[in-house]
Image: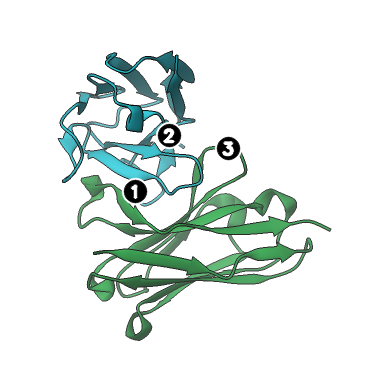
Amino acid sequence: DIQLTQTPSSLSASVGDRVIITCRASQYIITFVNWYQQKPGKAPKLLISGASSLQSGVPSRFSGSGSGTDFTLTINSLQPEDFATYYCQQSYSFPRVTFGPGTKVDIK
Amino acid sequence: EVQLVESGGGLVQPGGSLRLSCVASGFPFSSYSMSWVRQAPGKGLEWVSYITTTGSTVYYTDSVKGRFTISRDDAKNSLFLQMNSLRAEDTAVYFCAKLGTTVTSGIGPWGQGTLVSVSS
């Protein structure tokens, strides 16, 4: 199975900060990484697919990059509504996809 | 607007069964593969099962193989998950989710989830 690790597991940030979350895969997965945002008690929401393609309706302050085994999700100018948990997910072994353990972003 | 509404969760004893349903609207259900993903309380996301558009091909995560069965009824825009021989470790919120048209499309939208609790 392809394992994903995320760093950090949690972080505290202020409104306006730039936040960078990293996701590392246990093997080469090209750009088959997606990113999700989940708020407490809610379903996950797809933010970015294919490592860098922003989904329709997702603010442009979100961006993704990377290829191979290392990927990043960047949130520029963090907004109050961005406080949530973020998950990466690999689709290289589709349909047997796996998710990273998550990164919780809370208010400093 | 795409909507996915799950139902069928509840409290069940170990060894018991439950059947989850997911009713879809706002998109041509029969044209999309679907998945179930679960989330144990306070934990991360775990893919559970996948079904193709025709229902002819299905996949399961190893821990539920032989116990869970995914199916669909395109006439009713519905996805199902029959869960038998339930264990405490199956306790989770179960989400149904629409898959994209390509492998790189990602998973979404998701339903709101239905909670399955396995306990004596």
Direction right: furthest residue:
B120
- The x, y position of residue B111, in whole percent, is 41, 59
Chain letter for the green part: B
**Residue at 49% across, 57% down:** B113
Q: Secondary structure at mark 3?
A: loop
User: Residue drawn at (33%, 86%), measured in percent from left and top?
Assistant: B75
Please state which amino acid type lies under the numbered disc 3.
Answer: Lys
Q: Amino acid at mark 2?
A: Ile
Q: Nearer the viewer, residue A3 or A86?
A: A86
Q: Is residue A78 left or right of residue B50?
A: left
Residue B2: image location, x then y, percent: 27, 64
Could you classify mark 1 by the number of other residues whose Cα lies within 10 Å: few (under 14), some (14-19), or many (20 or more)? Answer: few
Labels 1, 3: front one: 3
Q: Are marks 1 and 3 in contact (CB under 8 Å)?
A: no
Which subunit holds the residue at mark 2?
A: A
Q: Nearer the viewer, mark 2 or mark 3?
A: 3
Please give the residue where the numbered disc 1 appears in the rendered image: A94
Q: Quadrant of residue A44?
A: top left
Q: Is residue B34 above or below residue A69?
A: below
User: Residue beneath label 2, please?
Assistant: A2
- Return the residue at label 3: B43
Which class describes the residues within 10 Å of circle 2: few (<14), some (14-19), or many (20+)? some
Image quadrant where one finds the N terminus of chain B: bottom left
User: Is residue A8 among the parts visible in the rendering?
Assistant: no
The answer to whether dots 2 and 3 both sit on one chain is: no
Q: Residue furthest bottom?
A: B75
Q: Which element is circle 2 on?
A: loop
